[in-house]
Image: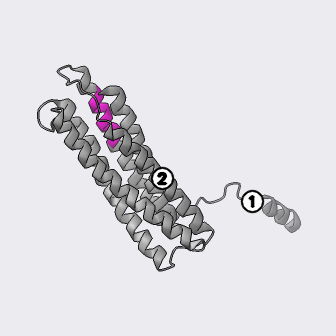
Amino acid sequence: MDKSINIQQRDIKPSLKTLSMHPLKFALWLFIVSIVMMFAALTSAYIVRQAEGDWLIYDLPTIFLINTIILVSSSITMHIAYIAAKKDNFKTLKVAMVFTALLAIAFLVGQFFAWGELVNIEVYFVGNPAGSFLYVISGLHAFHLITGVIFIFIMLFSAFKFNVHSKNMVKMEMCTTYWHFLDGLWVYLYIFLLLNH
């Protein structure tokens, strides 16, 4: 009797493994989801308002495309930095992180000039809702990108102190994930604005 109970107990094994995630990564993903929801709401409102009429038709300045290429390039250098960190290649890690930071700053400066170009073609923040939406969408993205740049500089400082390596990758993984997300978000927003301006 006891033997049969023991056999049955051995046969009953948990079929599912417990899923685990670092608390900081979980918090980051919650933050990303909230950003996705915010921009989904903004782009939906954009389409609804555009359908109501009284919508300014304009061409997106070419500098928006240049800025997009710069930001995608920063994603590449960030990925190079991530791979270098996993391989404990500290020299490549530092160089790639510096380039990522410079490209990120170049994007933000480029966005400032893009807004200047919009003013030159008489697309203003106040006035027609087409301009208001464009400034709000690109401005909110720029704000979140600034938080990403701060994260990059924190990781860059850590890299120069040799605190980023194959056995300490949590924050580097978070920084990489967040940066790729912000880059992908801008690509989506740029294509959306290009098709619906």
Q: Which one is nearer the viewer's eye here, 49 or 160?
A: 160
Residue type at numbered disc 1: Lys
Above or below — where is 183 with respect to 64?
below
Residue placed furthest toward the bottom: 161
Question: In the drawing, does residue 140 fall left or right of residue 190?
Answer: left
The structure residue drawn at horizontal position 15% and vertical position 29%, both measured from the top left corner, is 128
Q: Which residues are magenta?
A: 39-47
Amino acid on which disc 2 is placed? Ser
Q: Position of residue 131 (x, y in %)?
A: 20, 34
Q: Secondary structure at mark 2?
A: helix
Q: Is residue 145 above or below residue 125?
A: below
Earlier in the chain: of badge 2 and badge 1, it is: 1
Q: Position of residue 65 (x, y in %)?
A: 37, 39
User: Is residue 35 located in the magenta-colored stretch of the structure?
Assistant: no
Gap in angstroms between the C-alphas marked 2 and 1: 43 Å
Residue indicated by mark 1: 13
Q: Residue at x 26, y 42 (%)?
A: 114
Q: Which residue is mark 2?
A: 75
Instruction: Residue 169: tell me if it is visible.
Output: no
Find residue 147 and report its horizontal and vertical position in percent: 33, 59
Which residue occupies 15% across, 32% down? 122
As helix, strand or loop, the secondary structure at mark 1 comes to loop
Name the disc covering residue 80, or none: none
Residue at x 53%, y 63% (from the top left corner): 81
Q: Is residue 43 magenta?
A: yes
Residue 125, by quadrant, is: top left
In the displayed structure, does residue 144 sit left or right of residue 15? Answer: left
Q: Position of residue 118 (x, y in %)?
A: 21, 37
Q: Does 105 appear above or below 172?
A: above
